[in-house]
Amino acid sequence: MRNKIIYWIATLWLSLGMVATGSVQVLKWKPEADYITHLGYPVFALTIIGVWKILGVVAILIPKFPLLKEWAYAGFFFIMTGAIFSHIADGDPVKDLLPALLLLVLTLVSWYFRPLDRKIAMA
């Protein structure tokens, strides 16, 4: 029961964070567009990242499809580690790493504590 509570708290916070950031990315909100260009990426990358974040949340929240969930978690892991390392490479202050670091931790906690019916069956 404890693991299920940890899973759902982490997953709901992760989903909220990914939908919120994905939405402003898809909408190319000016502060977000400025931020991504500051890191050296083109603005069109916001649409790609934002759409995949939102689809990843759908994949994680729907029942069944454990392989799809693994791909979504992997995508979140790659996006968040990429964001963290982009900020480090750009010399940004630690405070700029914290949102991506929080989403990375939530990704790992959600993945680790996911129920058996959301895992790929091992043969």
Image (cartoon, rainbow, N blue to C red):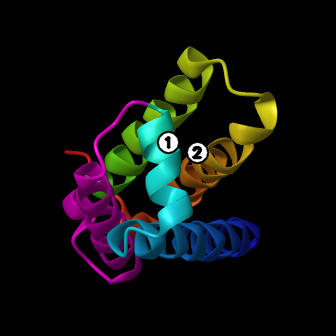
Q: Which residue is drawn at the image coordinates 55% and 49% (left, top)?
A: 112
Q: Is residue 101 shown left or right of residue 77?
A: right
Give percent across and percent down for residue 91.
65, 18
Magenta-drawn stretch contains 49: yes
Q: Which residue is drawn at the image coordinates 68% and 26% (left, top)?
A: 92
Q: Which residue is drawn at the image coordinates 34% and 64% (left, top)?
A: 50
For the question of whether residue 114 can be seen, the reply is no
Magenta stretch: helix, strand or loop mostly: helix
Cα separation, mark 2 vs mark 1, equals 6 Å
The quarter in which the C terminus is drawn is top left
Mark 1 is surrounded, within 10 Å at the Cα level, by few (under 14), some (14 to 19) or many (20 or more) other residues, namely many
In-front residue for pair 31/48: 31
State which tag comes first along the sequence, 2 or 1.
1
Which residue was labeled with disc 2?
104
Q: Which residue is drawn at the image coordinates 58% and 45% (left, top)?
A: 104
For the question of whether residue 13 can be seen, the reply is yes
Magenta-drawn stretch contains 23: no
Q: Is residue 90 shown left or right of residue 48?
A: right
Which residues, given as a range, are shown in magenta?
40-69
Give percent across and percent down for residue 90.
56, 20
Classify residue 79 by image quadrant. Answer: top left
- Please, what is the three-letter code of the amino acid marked with disc 1? Met
In the image, residue 106 above or below residue 88: below
- Please, what is the three-letter code of the amino acid marked with disc 2? Leu
Which residue was labeled with disc 1?
80
Disc 2 vs disc 1: which is toward the camera? 1
Which SS class for mark 2?
helix
Q: Is residue 102 shown left or right of residue 86?
A: right
